[in-house]
Image (tube, rainbow, N blue to C red):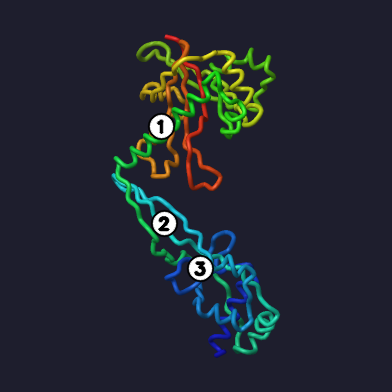
Amino acid sequence: MKTTELAEAAAVLKALTEGWALVDSGPEIDFLVFVSEDRDELDFYPKKSFVQMMERSGLIENRDREGSSVRQPHTYYERGPSVWKEVTEAGPIVFQYRITPKGQELLRDAPKLIGRSVRALRPATSPINTQSKPLSVVTYDRPQIQKLVHAFEQKATTLIEGAFSPKNDLDRAASASRGFVCGPRLWGTLEPHARRNGLKPSGSLLSVTYNLRGKGAKQKKSARKLEDRLILPSDEARLFWKTFNEAFKIDGRLAIRRATRAERSAYTYHEEIENSDFPPPNLAGLTILFIVEGNNSRFMVLVKSVPEDNMEHFEPEVTWLEIMPKN
């Protein structure tokens, strides 16, 4: 190697020794980026061909050759005034390089070989632009998003019908949820039945509602503390739906509709419902409050779009239930 190449090789070896990882941000980018666990970057960027030459020379070796040849595509969304763009990129490769004994020897002898100290490692003041060319860009306008929301709403309706059915498969209902919240009024109705069934919710969430009394300047705001009950998945959820069905004995057809704006304000965090009018194409963050009527009882049922384990696909899930006061 030339002196300049030895100096650069020594800097690469020094960075690997100090825990920096080499990242290939995209197939059309000709350099690699040193990244730390804290997502900092170094201020020098070795060429891919140079690092490959170091590997061929036996200075470094890749502990994960198979994984380092496969890019995992990832998708993100960009919102415009009236469209969403679904952008899919090839994804980065994080190399698992380690220094060989030959590389350790070069790093030790580098100051003598290059006639000076190995360059100091300095974090970059700002990340370098490594924007990779997208594999695909799909644009969704409002009508297309509304079709996706409508399909989600139909799934949510089916989910609610199954949960409220007297023939509810309790084991399936319990396993289909990651836990949900029972509102204070509904819990007050269910509690006597719950005790008999051995249902003791593991936790509670305190919420505060405010009421205005009086007129004009004499109005006073009073706070009322209510406790939502947190129903955890598995056994608690199974006992909850058993208790719910015993208490209300809902049979026949349910009337299910979206809540009105006034009804949505009854939910503690109603702003998350207001912000769900134009969700991204994967429906992340979509939140719908339904009004469900059956056997002369009315309920508020909140359904959220919840990610599956792979965090790529979102499905509806009941996350909050409350009974509404009778008129």
Q: In this view, does 164 lie above or below 77?
A: above
The amino acid beneath tag 3 is: Asp
Residue 209's place in the image compared with 138, above or below, is above
Horizontal side, residue 159 vs residue 241: left or right: left
Residue topped by disc 1:
153
**Would you name the residue on which mark 3 appears?**
24
Residue nearer the viewer, 36 or 132? 132
Q: Is mark 2 on a helix, strand or loop?
A: strand
Q: Distance between the residues labelled 1 and 3?
A: 41 Å
Q: Where is residue 68 in the image (x, y as percent from the top left)?
A: 56, 67
Q: What residue type is labelled 1?
A: Glu
Q: Where is residue 317 in the image (x, y as percent from the top left)?
A: 50, 33
Q: Residues within 10 Å of mark 1 (few under 14, many from 20)?
A: some
Q: Which comes before the other along the chain, label 1 or label 2?
A: 2
The residue carrying mark 2 is 88
How far across and how far down the image is residue 259, in percent?
39, 24
Looking at the picture, does residue 158 appear above or below residue 250? below
Question: Where, quadrant-wise, is the N terminus in this rendering?
Answer: bottom right
